[in-house]
Image (spheres, grey):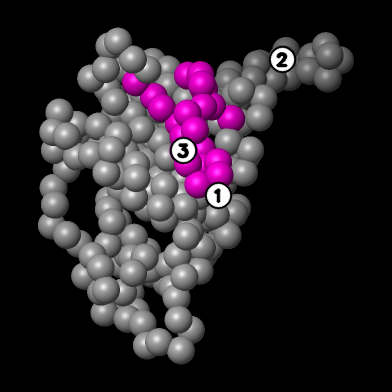
Amino acid sequence: MVNYDPSARLPSSKELPDSDDTPVDNELQKAIPDLLRSALARAWADRMDWFFGIRMGIYYDPGLPAIVPDAFLSLGVKRFYDENLRLSYVLWEEKKLPILVFEVVSQIDRGEYSTKKAEYTRLGFLYYVIYNPFRSDKPRLEVYKLVNNAYELLNGDRIWLPEIGLAIGIERGTYLGIPREWLYWYDEQGERFLTPEEQMKQAQQEAQQAQQELRRVQRLRSLGVDPDSLL
């Protein structure tokens, strides 16, 4: 848990570094969070009480550097402040701990199963999600939930997260033109949130169907047939 002295003068997000200049060493470290964020942006388009950060610093102690997970989700915060968006995520400003942190494992050991897991446990993030695309003998997706100050592994390839109201899981699909296993959000009925490409394809199909129906109606009327009489 994180606590602050309310009488202390704490630095603002504008005063703190907004980058650690650490590049990603795996394309999936950005592509997978991008997919998850874009799906939420469509599904939660009318909600302004959430924020999904990608490779953004989380400041939890004014005397320490930020931690930078591959992605994180916060609920109960402003989706954006102004047109400049967030520089970083500062806990003493946000007053909300991210509910979920996410890491994509690369071929370089970055402590996802050890030091980062211990740090996220100490800070109190409710869910910790690890995706390891290089695993073959163990589950590639692991979702942990904080229970009694310790992370417990939740079983399954599609995990329901009741505090978020969504499930997260893996299945094969196509994103950015790349067919492979991807991570997706699912609703309570198990329906998968669409990717931007799938949304566009669906919209095109619906537009084509509408045009076909319009041409059918126009053809019937040109023959003197009332389309409504055929219903």
Amino acid, disc 1? Ala
Q: CA distance from mark 3 to mark 2?
A: 65 Å
Q: Secondary structure at mark 2?
A: helix
Q: Residues within 10 Å of mark 3 (few under 14, many from 20)?
A: many
Q: Is residue 219 left or right of residue 101?
A: right
Q: Nearer the viewer, residue 28 or 146?
A: 146
Point out the frontmost of discs 2 and 1.
1
Name the disc covering residue 45, or none: 1
Q: Secondary structure at mark 1?
A: loop
Residue on which disc 3 sits: 151
N-term-proximal mark, 3 vs 2: 3
Q: Residue 77 placed where, x, y %?
A: 53, 63
The image quarter containing residue 76 is bottom right
Q: Secondary structure at mark 3?
A: strand
The image quarter containing residue 140 is top left
> Where are the magenta residues, as a range?
140-160
Point out the frontmost of discs 3 and 2.
3
